[in-house]
Image (cartoon, helix red, strand yellow):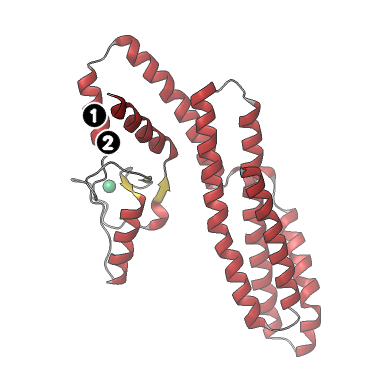
Amino acid sequence: MIKLHVSLWVEFVFISFRAVLCLLEMSLSSVQSTLSTLKSCQADIGACMDMISDVALGIVEAQGMNNSPSLKKLEEMIMECSRLDREINCFVESVDEKTAQVRNEPPEAMVHLRNSVKDRFSELMAGVSDADLQRHSKVVAFKDSIRKYAMQGQTDAENEEEELDEDIAVTQSQTNFICPLTQVEMVNPVKNKKCSHYYDQAAVLEMIKAKHKNKKNFRCPKVGCDNRDVQQSDLELDLVMKRMIQNHKRQSGKT
Ligand SMILES: [Zn+2]
């Protein structure tokens, strides 16, 4: 299903590229609106990458890390998303650059705009290496969360052997899962990269939006934290934490 999702996106984005290239011959203002549609596709590509990571964690949970071919396949898919994301960036950059140049040139220059964008795009993409694609924050998160989740599984198994006081373990994990904003268990936990505190995604985004609307900073709601300016770009969805909360919910539902 995800595979289908990704290939649909690839197709969609290429159609959009072509649409922009056609529009280049018509008017610069319609180019801008099509470009912003293309930029909004990037949010969906990001969501798709989170979905791939989540499926990968499911595989790790079921089968462990044993060099599963499915994990390899998922890695290829997330790299494909990373490339697509980069293609949009390069494309937007080339259109922005070339249309800016054309504005200062005589109208005849418009004729060559299409080709010059195409050339610049190929030039930018040629400079993109595999290592660049690996550095995409969501590719890094994909690898980190698989590693973290596999380690978590090991620690859990060891803890069970050591027969830790279960009550303490349960209380500790429950407090970690509570959002400081909603005071209930998080659904989509995001981690603040700056102060390492967690919040529920929907709640924190709403708070940031409300504060910024009133021209105020949103400070980290965690008691004792001195981070006075939380930005949306500081937040990262933590899929390992999400899965731990889901597992915890399932286990406590059983008893
Ligand atoms: Zn904090």
Q: Which residue is mark 2?
A: 176
In the image: residue 160, left or right of residue 135: left
Which sits in the foreground, 241 or 112?
241
Which residue does the numbered mark 1 point to in the structure image?
172
Query: Residue 8's spot in the image, x, y percent?
Result: 67, 53
CB of mark 2 within 8 Å of CB of mark 1? yes
For label 2, being within 8 Å of ligand 1 is answered no
Does 241 sit left or right of 117 as displayed?
left
Mark 1 surroundings within 10 Å by alpha-carbon count, few (fewer than 14), some (14 through 19), many (20 or more): few
Task: Report which quarter residue 15 is drawn in.
Answer: bottom right
Name the disc covering residue 147, or none: none
- Mark 1 residue element: helix
Q: Which residue is located at x 67 percent, y 84 percent?
A: 103
Which residue is found at the position 64% from the left and 80% from the top?
Answer: 30
Cα separation, mark 2 vs mark 1, equals 6 Å
Measured from the top left, where is residue 132 in percent x and y?
A: 63, 47
Q: Position of residue 116 (x, y in %)?
A: 78, 72
- Please report the residue visible at 24 percent of the width from the left and 49 percent of the height from the top: 182
